Image (cartoon, helix red, strand yellow):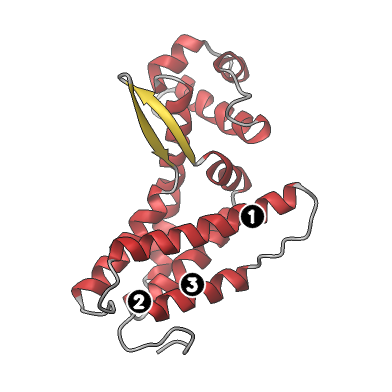
Amino acid sequence: MPAEHPSRHRLFAAARKLFAEAGYENTSTSSIAREAGTSESQLIKHFGGKAGLLDSIFVDGWAALRPWFDERLQQAGSPAERLRMIPRLMIEALGNDPELRLLLLLEGRRIRKEGGQAQLMDGFRGLAELLDRTLAEMAERGQLREGFSPEAARAALLGLTEGAMRDQLLAERAGRPATITVEHIGTLTDLLVDLIQVGTLSGAGRP
């Protein structure tokens, strides 16, 4: 978590808490400043506004998770095995941080306006970078089946993981049993990897 200035640290913690409790749209900059015991001018100074605060929460979250992912992915014997692990690790990591999980899944795709232009705030860019790095290694080794681009494979894996986790969360918040399990997501991930990897057939199992 940011620690270079006390008021920045407090604003960051207050925003994380309030965004998770009330949602981004329902949280005002004044309520964040009040929770943090500081002023809105300090919020603007450190983050540029509410959107900058949310973006910083995502950046900080991925910075904290990255060493954890890297350590576990080192145990895999091949890029394809790392690719199979990433969605499973994502679910485990966010299960240990409910606030970040909720914010990513409900607020992770948002338009922010800067300099008169609208830009996509992508809370999942850390996951996309992990997938891109792994798929690029597979492509360099000639392990991607012809006709499958790394970008298309990343989009499929990212969409599967993000969408399934969001459905899980919405079911939990509605008080319904989650019909999508970790095992379901893992099975679908394996099928996708089998489909794009040279030397395997869709549904044929791991090489």
Q: Distance between the residues labelled 1 and 2?
A: 25 Å
- SS at mark 1 in the image: helix
Amino acid marked by disc 3:
Thr
Q: Name the residue under label 3.
A: 189
Q: Mark 2 points at which residue?
A: 196
Q: In which quarter of the image is the C terminus?
A: bottom left
**Sooner in the amino-acid sequence: mark 1 or mark 3:** 1
**Sooner in the amino-acid sequence: mark 1 or mark 2:** 1
- SS at mark 3 in the image: helix
40 vs 4, nearest the viewer: 40
Q: Name the residue under label 1.
A: 167
90 vs 38, nearest the viewer: 90
- SS at mark 2 in the image: helix
Res. 138 mark: none
Q: In the displayed orientation, state which residue is furthest to the front.
A: 147
**Sooner in the amino-acid sequence: mark 3 or mark 2:** 3
What is the number of callouts on the image? 3
Q: In this view, does 197 lie above or below 42?
A: below
Amino acid marked by disc 1:
Asp
Q: Is residue 76 visible?
A: no
User: Could you say where residue 145 lies in the image, as x and y percent from the top left?
Assistant: 28, 79
**Nearer the viewer's eye, disc 3 or disc 2?**
2
Q: Is residue 111 above or below residue 40?
A: below
User: Could you say where residue 200 lies in the image, as x and y percent from the top left?
Assistant: 37, 88
Q: Distance between the residues labelled 3 and 2?
A: 11 Å
Q: Which residue is drawn at 73% across and 52% down?
A: 172
